[in-house]
Amino acid sequence: MQASAGPVIVLDSCASTMDAAFEMALADRLSPWASVVAARQEQGRGQLRRGWVSTPGNLHVTLRLPEFSAAFAALCPLLLGYAASVALEPLGVDTLVKWPNDLLTSGGKVGGLLVEERRGILLVGMGLNLSHAPLVGELRRDHALAAGVLRLDPPRGPLCTWLVMGSGMRRTLNGTLAGSPRDFLTRLLRPRLAFLGRRVRVVDGSTQVEGVFEGLDEDGSLRIDRSGREGGMVRLYSGSIYPL
């Protein structure tokens, strides 16, 4: 039996779909695999609580997830980025996963995911640029890539897009979680990693590391080869990755 998207609650406007989904889950109104879609968000946010431009016509959604096994818990953002990338293929879009949780096309960054667990409730929020990409002046000053727009073939609105993606992500997650973390990292995710084999700079606060992006360790950390420099291969657990 194919996995279907769970119940979808559609809102005209909210502060953020993440906050709305959390409140609904606390009130037992949002079960695992159910989701909240909003036409607009007044206080959308991304990683590190950075603002997320939430223009009507783009997809703003939060999905409640079931509890993941301990083996996959540390890989949750990567799992969800991979599942979203796979779910976009039937919509005619090929994407790459930018560690740890962005989606890229040749046109730039087209989406991002945010995973939060609060009071035992696991949620993933996602924004996809379906009709509008933020202008350079709307992006944070240290952004790594220009923003782009997904070119769906044929074009679809946010809700129709999510109905396809939601069922696809659920199916992909169920199949991936039945396997091993090593198989996921080496066989499934690796071919979709952005900047693999390229020189990159990883910035984490005042710390910067440059080298060749060699892939991921079993815990999902970046492996950066600093050949010729003290330290050689290093592993990084946080930061923003920039192609050089």
Image (cartoon, helix red, strand yellow):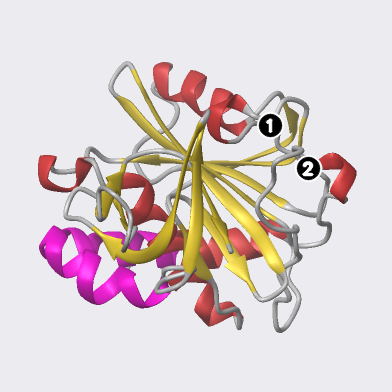
Separation of marks 1 and 2 at Cα, in angstroms: 14 Å
Identify the residue under disc 2: 139
Note whether 121 is above or below 244 in the view shown.
above
Q: Is residue 94 left or right of residue 159?
A: left
What kind of residue is marked 2?
Leu
Residue at image point 51% right, 79% down: 89
> Which quarter of the figure is the C terminus placed in?
bottom right
What kind of residue is marked 1?
Gly
Note whether 166 is above or below 239 in the view shown.
below
Looking at the rendered image, the disc whose residue lies closer to the viewer, 1 or 2, is 2
Q: Position of residue 138 (x, y in %)?
A: 85, 41
Identify the residue under disc 1: 44
Quarter of the image where one finds residue 25: top left
Q: Position of residue 92 (x, y in %)?
A: 61, 83
Q: Position of residue 153 (x, y in %)?
A: 70, 83
Q: Compare residues 212 and 241 and report the one nearer the observer.
A: 212
Most common secondary structure along the magenta stretch: helix
- Mark 2 Cα-neighbour bin, 10 Å: few <14, some 14–19, many ≥20: some
Q: Which mark is residue 22?
A: none
Q: Compare residues 56 and 220 and report the one nearer the observer.
A: 220
Quarter of the image where one finds residue 151: bottom right
Q: Range of the magenta residues?
A: 167-192
Q: Is residue 85 left or right of residue 107?
A: left
Q: Is residue 39 left or right of residue 137?
A: left
Q: Position of residue 185 (x, y in %)?
A: 23, 65
Q: Upstream in the sequence, badge 1 or badge 2?
A: 1
Q: Secondary structure at mark 1?
A: loop
Q: Secondary structure at mark 2?
A: loop
